[in-house]
Image (cartoon, rainbow, N blue to C red):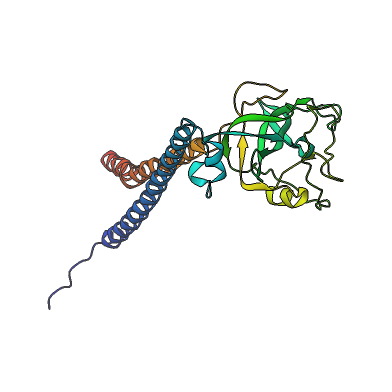
Amino acid sequence: MTPEPLVSSATPRRRAGRGRFLVVTLAAVLALAATVSLGRWQLSRAAQKEALQARIDAQKLKAPLSQAEFLALGEAAGEMHRPVRLRGLWLTAQMVYLDNRQMHGTPGFYVLTPFALEGSEQAVMVQRGWVQRNFVDRTQLGVVETPPGIVELTALIEPPPSHLFELGAKAAPAPAALAAAPAPAASGPTAPAPGIQGSSPIRQNLDLEAFRAETQLPLRTDVSLQQSGPASEGLQRDWPAPALGLERHYGYAFQWFGLSALVVILYVWFQFISPFRRARRRARDGRSL
């Protein structure tokens, strides 16, 4: 009778250990692949934003569009951020002050005024600059000088004014007639908006479509203009750069690559270094016996 081979009690433990090793290795590989891929994706997003910033900077260096070219402009997306030179009339009766806008960390108003283009039936909204608010009475508006008559304007073609978070929307007032006559040369400390009946010139946000319906102005609603240059007419024009979020993408990429490094460190520690230290300790304890 042939005796059955003896099976070491350590064999099941070795098989279980190999199984755990393979499972942990697979999990580490998947985690490493995911975190590296996400980090690379964040870097690619940052590169896209940098390319976008380069295109914006290149647009600003182009020669200004003429008034005829601007009036003939259909889709404005391809000419966004490009300079334009126009002639027309300020419609200060419809001047708007956008509240809670900051410049150099100081709260104030963005001042927007419609600009009626000479020789056409078209108007465009111009973001003229920033004025500091009165911290005692926010309804006391700073003086903004507005040249009367036909003036020449050089500005950048920009998207409509950005919107801030607003808790509730107010009902639009009744439409007002178009004020075509020249407006006063300056809006005083308590200047109302006489061309917008029942409406305050101070607003949280401005939707150009709703403003066009409200005022009955032949206003272009897909773009606005943004004046640049040194302070003048009581306005500052240090406009903040578009928030493209480059720092956020690089920060996320650093976090994902940091997690990748942590996965590698933990894998090497628990799969190799820690078992090696336990084996050496058992061997040393065995020799001491």
Q: Residue at x 71, y 23 (%)?
A: 233
- Along the viewing direction, whichever of 6 and 77 lies nearer the viewer: 77
Left or right: residue 96 compared with residue 163:
right
At x 17%, y 69%, the residue is: 5
| Horizontal and vertical percent position of residue 70 | 55, 41
Quick one: which residue is furthest to the left in this view? 1
Q: Which of the 4 image quadrants contains residue 27?
A: bottom left
Give the quadrant of the N terminus. Answer: bottom left
**Image spot of residue 32 (x, y percent):** 37, 48
From the top left corner, tell me how far across and down residue 82 is, in percent: 51, 36
Which picture quadrant has residue 274? top left
Which residue occupies the foreground of this view, 255 or 139? 139
Question: Looking at the image, is 172 positioned above or below residue 132?
Answer: below
Side of 86 where 62 appears, left or right: left
Instruction: Name the residue located 69 percent from the left edge and 51 percent from the top edge.
Output: 209
* Above or below 259: residue 18: below
Counting from the top left corner in percent of width and height, residue 103 is at 67, 27
